[in-house]
Image: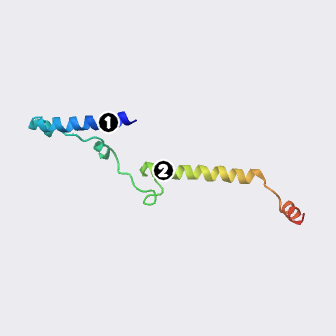
């Protein structure tokens, strides 16, 4: 772990020192990294409360949260509906004992 950290620091130092001695044209090369993800391709996504009747326009994270919440409610509701649970008479009988 420590050797990996030391190797990374050494590589960063070498990169910084070599970039100073590199020609001026090298500094003009665009280095965007992950900045390209912000480019929009297609219709703009909106918050689900701004357009609740169009799930295709919702932001992806909103769609996931609402979908998982809906599935959770459906499963829990089905469990409560079909499990039966204890009857009130059984609860009273246990409380008396």
Q: Position of residue 27 (x, y in %)?
A: 14, 39
Q: Quadrant of the N terminus?
A: top left
Residue under pointer 2: 63
Residue 77: name its quadrant: bottom right
Label 2 element class = helix
Q: Position of residue 73 (x, y in %)?
A: 62, 53
User: Would you call the spot at circle 1 few (<14 residues within 10 Å), some (14-19), or many (20 or more)?
Assistant: few
Q: Position of residue 60 (x, y in %)?
A: 44, 48
Q: Residue at x 28, y 40 (%)?
A: 33
Is residue 16 shown above or below 72? Answer: above
Q: Nearer the viewer, residue 13 or 38?
A: 13
The answer to whether the residues at label 1 and label 2 have Cβ atoms under 8 Å apart is no
Q: Nearer the viewer, residue 55 or 25?
A: 25
Tell me the distance, in whole angstroms, between the alpha carbons under discs 1 and 2.
43 Å
Q: Residue furthest left?
A: 24
User: Would you call the spot at circle 2 few (<14 residues within 10 Å), some (14-19), or many (20 or more)?
Assistant: some
Q: Is residue 82 left or right of residue 68?
A: right
Q: Residue at x 51, y 51 (%)?
A: 65
Instruction: Give the mark nearest the N terminus, 1 or 2.
Output: 1
Q: Position of residue 61 (x, y in %)?
A: 45, 50
Q: Residue at x 52, y 53 (%)?
A: 66
Is residue 7 shown above or below 67? Answer: above
Colour treatment of the image = rainbow
Residue under pointer 1: 6
Is residue 15 shown above or below 41? Answer: above
């Amino acid at each position: 772990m420590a050797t990996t950290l030391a190797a990374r620091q050494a590589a960063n130092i070498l990169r910084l020192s070599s970039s100073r001695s590199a020609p001026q044209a090298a500094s003009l090369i665009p280095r965007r990294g992950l900045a390209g993800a912000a480019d929009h391709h297609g219709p703009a996504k909106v918050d689900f409360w701004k357009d609740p009747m169009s799930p295709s326009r919702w932001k992806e994270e909103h769609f996931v949260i609402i979908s998982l919440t809906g599935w959770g409610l459906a499963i829990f509701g089905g469990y409560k509906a079909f499990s039966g649970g204890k009857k009130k008479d059984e609860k009273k009988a246990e409380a008396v004992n």
